[in-house]
Image (cartoon, rainbow, N blue to C red):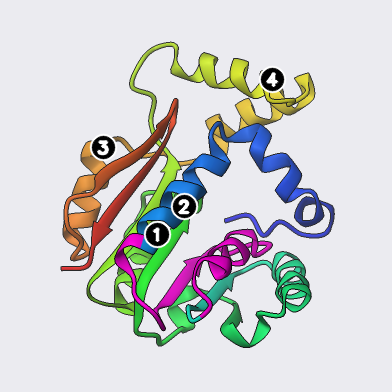
Amino acid sequence: MPTFTQEEASEYDSRITRLIPGYDLLHSTTAAQLSATLGDNAHILVVGSGTGKEIAELAKINSTWRFTAQDISTDMLNIGQQRFSDLGISERVNVHAGDITELNEAVDAALCLFVMHFLPDNGDKKDMFKAIAKQLKPQSSLYLADLMRPETSFERDAQFSLCQQLGLTDIGVERIKHNFEHEFYPLDRIRLADLLDETRFSVGKLYFKALGFSGYVTHKR
């Protein structure tokens, strides 16, 4: 699991939109579903909250929502804490620098966006799902978005082409190709369904798809 330190942390927000087609749309559609399903005083866990951008946007939707921002990167969380302070929402955000297993929450929804594909399917993914389930109230929602295994022979090539159109340099494309091959651990839909079932989640419902990236909503059983 990468920790995104120093320069990687400071450049994350500007770089991620060149790596993930529809990145902002994914966050908007996730936020819309939270708005439609959660009432006042809801508590939302954001796994791998990074620089806090999604929490900052969600905090605008409902002034009573509270958040737990979890990440293993102190540098990313420092950026997030400064953002929360600038927006005057620090009192609504519990920041946790460390593993999710160290938390003991009872949240109304959880977001795990572009985190799981960093974990190998050697028990680490399953452990992460179990840890998230432990934090959720029964029937609460998990919004999950990740890089998935390609469904066509040309999907990856299309991804790289689109990333270049979004502003990624040739060097950046070569780097992401290396990451896809050696540092990411995408699942196919069948394996994802198995893991969700094994960890007490319902069948994931697809709500976002942009080439190799997919977003699902599931519920704790």
Q: Residue tagged by mark 3?
A: 189
- Amino acid of disc 2: Leu
Q: Was residue 56 drawn as part of the magenta stretch in this picture?
A: yes
Residue indicated by mark 4: 164
Pointer 4 or 2: first along the chain: 2
Q: Residues within 10 Å of mark 1 (few under 14, many from 20)?
A: few
Task: Name the mark nearer the viewer: 1 or 3.
Answer: 3
**Earlier along the polypeptide chain: callout 1 or callout 3?**
1
Mark 1 highlights which residue?
A: 124
Q: Residue at x 61, y 80 (%)?
A: 95
Report the Cα–Cα distance between label 1 and label 3.
Answer: 18 Å
| Front in this rendered view, residue 48 or 34 | 34
Q: Is residue 54 visible?
A: yes
Q: Where in the figure is residue 159, as x and y percent of width and height?
A: 54, 21
Identify the residue under disc 2: 119
Q: Which mark is residue 41?
A: none
Amino acid of disc 3: Arg
| Disc 2 from disc 1: Cα separation | 6 Å
Kindly state the secondary structure of the residue where label 2 is placed: loop
